[in-house]
Image (cartoon, rainbow, N blue to C red):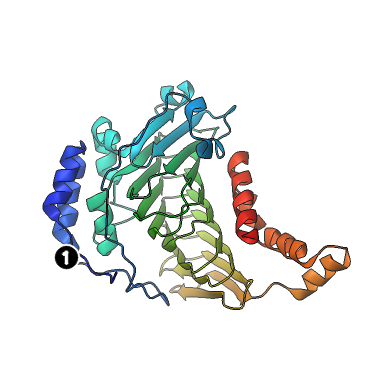
Amino acid sequence: MANEFVLDKEKVLNDAEQNGVTEFFTNKRKEALDLIDRLDLIKPDKTRIYNWDFFTVEQPFTESSTFDSISDLPEKVKEVVEVENVENLYVQHNNTKAFVELSESLKSQGVIVEDIFTASENHKDLVEKYFMTEGVAVDENKLTAYHQAMLNGGVFIYVPKNVKVEAPIQVVFYHDDENASLYNHVLLVGDEGSEVTYVENYVTNLESANGQLNVVSEVLAKDNAKINYGAVDFLAKDLTGYVVRRGVTSRDAEIDWALGLMSDSNVIYDNTTYLNGDNSESEVKIVTIGRGQQILNFTTEVIHYGKNTYGNILKHGVMKENANSVFNGIGHIKKGATNSNAQQESRVLMLDGKARGDANPILLIDEDEVEAGHAASAGRVDELQLFYLMSRGLKREEAERLVIHGFLAPVVVSLPIESVKNLLVEVIEDKILH
C-alpha cells in the first residue's frame, strides 16, 4: 500500500470514548487531530518509506486477558521475568493493563508505576506537566501526532526526590493478537537526586502481525538523578514500526541506555538524548540483528547544551540474508557547551553478499573548547579471527557464531536483569542460526 494518510477523526474520538480514555488524553487526541494534516511524514536518511503503511489500524483497542499472579503469566512473559525474585513488575497484554506488582517499600516512598491513563487521573499534575512537553513534541511530524491521537497503552513511572530504587522496575509489553496495534507511551521521570533502573521488554508468540508499532518513551532525569534504561525488543515481522526513545538530562544528571533491538519488522528508530544540564552525561549502547528482507534505520543522537557534558554512542549491528540497515550516529555540541565531550562508534557486520549495512558517524561542533571523536566500519567477519578459531579446531559456522557473540557482547553485559540478558543471548543465537 502506498503511504497515503486517511483518518476518520470522529471514529478516533468515538473509539477513545468507548474505551474509557480520560479527559486529559481525549483533549490530547483532539489536539493531535487538529495538527496532523499540516505535518510532514518523517524523512529517514537513505531509507525509502513511500510504500510503508504507517496508518492502517484494524483494532484501535484490543481488550485482552489479565493475570492475577506471577504464576498465571504467559510462558513468553515468564521467560524475561525472574519469577522467584521479581519485586517490581508491570505487564501490558496487547492494549490491556494485565498485571502490576510494586514493593511496599517503593509505595511507601511515593514511587508511582501505573498505566498512563489511570495516572492521568490519579496524578494529573505530574502527567500534564511532563507528557510530550520536554522529550517529544506532538508537532514534530505526522507520526508523533498520530501517536498522540491513537495512544492505546503505556505506563507512567515517577521516582520522587532522593529516592534510590534498588531493585529494577520491569515493564513487559506482551503482544499475541496479530491485529493489535501498539501505540504505547512510556513516561519515566526521575526527580532530583533519585536513582532507578528501568527494564523494558517487547515480547510476542506471533511469527507475523498486521498492526502498527508506534511507540514513544520519554525519559526525564532531573538534577542529580540517574536513570539506567535497558530494553530488549523482539516483536514479529510485518508490523510497521516507528520507535522513539528520548532522554532529557538536567544538571549533574545521567541517562544510560542499553538497547537490544531484535524485532523482525521494518522499523525506523530514533534514540535522542538532550544533555541540557551542566555536567550531565549519557552512554548509549545498541545492538541489532537484521534478517530476511528486513529494513532498519537507526538515528542515535546525543545533543550537548550544558557545559562539561559527556555523551558516548556505541552501536553494533549484524545484517544477514537481504537485510538492509542504516546507522546514523550524531554527536552535536551546541554553542556554549564548553568542555563537552562527544564520542561514538558504529560498526556493522554483513554475513551475506546481499546484506547491507551503512554506518554514518556525524559530528556537529558549534563550540571550540570541546573533545570529539568517532569510529565507523561496515564489512564482513574478520577472516583472521575466523582462521585463528578454526585453527583451534572449530568449524567455520561455530567460529563465526562466537565472533558475532563477542561483537554484540558490550550491550548484552550491560543489561541489569539476568533473565533479560539470557533472553537477548537466546534471540541472538536464534537469529544467527535461522
Is 80 located above or below residue 379 in the figure? Answer: above
Q: Residue at x 34, y 68 (%)?
A: 52
Give how far across and how far down residue 306 sits, in percent.
43, 59
- Circle 1 sits in a helix, a strand or a loop, which is it? helix
Furthest-left residue in view? 10
Q: Quadrant of residue 48?
A: bottom left
Q: Residue at x 36, y 52 (%)?
A: 216
Q: Is residue 236 visible?
A: yes
Is 59 located above or below residue 45 in the figure? Answer: above
Q: Nearer the viewer, residue 51 or 306?
A: 51
Q: Is residue 313 visible?
A: no
How many other residues sit within 10 Å of disc 1, few (<14), some (14-19) or many (≥20)? few
Give how far across and how far down residue 372 sits, in percent.
55, 71
Q: Residue at x 29, y 51 (%)?
A: 132
Q: Nearer the viewer, residue 137 or 153?
A: 153
Residue type, numbered disc 1: Asp
Query: Is 413 left, or right, of 49 in this rendering?
Result: right
Which quadrant is the C terminus positioned in? bottom right
Furthest-right residue in view? 392
Which quadrant is the N terminus positioned in? bottom left
Q: Residue at x 46, y 52 (%)?
A: 235
Is 347 located above or below residue 17 in the figure? Answer: below
Query: Is 189 left, or right, of 126 in this rendering?
Result: right
Give how far across and how far down residue 309 sits, in percent.
50, 59
Q: According to the image, label 1 marks what residue?
A: 37
Q: Quadrant of residue 408?
A: bottom right
Give how far across and how far down residue 122 sits, in percent.
27, 30
